[in-house]
Image: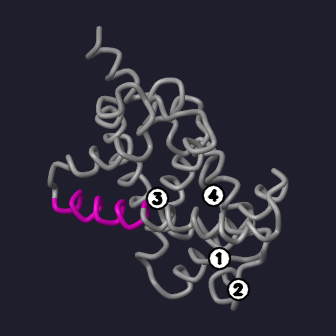
Amino acid sequence: MVSFINKLFGKKQPVDVVEENYNKIMQQSRNVSLFTHFNVPDTVNGRFESLTLHLFLILNKLRGNGGNYEEFAQEIIDHLVVKLDHALREEGVSDTKVAKRIKSMLTLFYGRIKAYDSAVERIELGKSDQQLVDFLGRTVFEKNLQPDEDAKRFEPYFQKAWHHIQQKSTDDILNNLLSDDEYGAILTDLKKTNISEEG
């Protein structure tokens, strides 16, 4: 593995380092409990929403440290674009339409990122976040039968996951030390709480 010094102060992260981090975030966003217990739709849109949220958690941490960390965050986003391009072409989308589709998806992506940025600002102030619940209901859970209830149940996961990553060292991210199941304990605890409340 490339040394931490090279990662941090090199002009650009090696592709394998970026891809390793991206793939790990992808795995985190695919935790089965997100779909089976918290009702994130197991659809193309639902998986994209989950990936966007989990990308945000890492990007927000990296950007908060500025400098080369922020550059690394941009490289992860660039890798997302590459993955979207490959996925669309594999689906048979024509060359002329790929750019338009990616532009549309990135518009959605950055809209989500902006909303989540606003959410963590409120979380840092210790404010209750009905705005985030409403936003999740309009986006992640929009097509569910009970989007508002699903969003309300899911919102504590966002808060706990964000706090969890904020307590991590940024170097852990650069050195790819986060687990594929980084938020597993949070999901397990919330599932137990939900089951207890519903019982």
User: Total marks drawn?
Assistant: 4
In this rendering, which labeled residue sits more in front, label 4 or label 1? 1
Tag 2: residue type?
A: Lys
State how far apart marks 2 and 4 are (Cα): 19 Å
Look at the image and say whether residue 97 sits in the magenta stretch.
no
Label 2 with label 3: CB-CB less than 8 Å: no
Residue 170 is situated, as x and y percent measured from the top left of the image, at 51, 69
Residue 199 is situated, as x and y percent measured from the top left of the image, at 29, 8
Dot label at residue 177: 4
Residue located beneath label 1 in the image:
75
Label 4 with label 1: CB-CB less than 8 Å: no
**Element marked by disc 4:** loop
Tag 3: residue type?
A: Leu
**Is the residue marked by circle 3 packed among few (<14), some (14-19), or many (20+) residues within 10 Å?**
many
Label 2 with label 4: CB-CB less than 8 Å: no
Residue located beneath label 3 in the image:
57
Q: Give the image quarter of residue 55.
A: bottom right
Stretch of the chain drawn in magenta = 112-125
**Element marked by disc 3:** helix
Label 2 with label 1: CB-CB less than 8 Å: yes
Look at the image and say whether residue 116 sits in the magenta stretch.
yes
| Mark with earlier residue (3, 4) | 3
Tag 1: residue type?
A: Glu
| Mark with earlier residue (4, 1) | 1
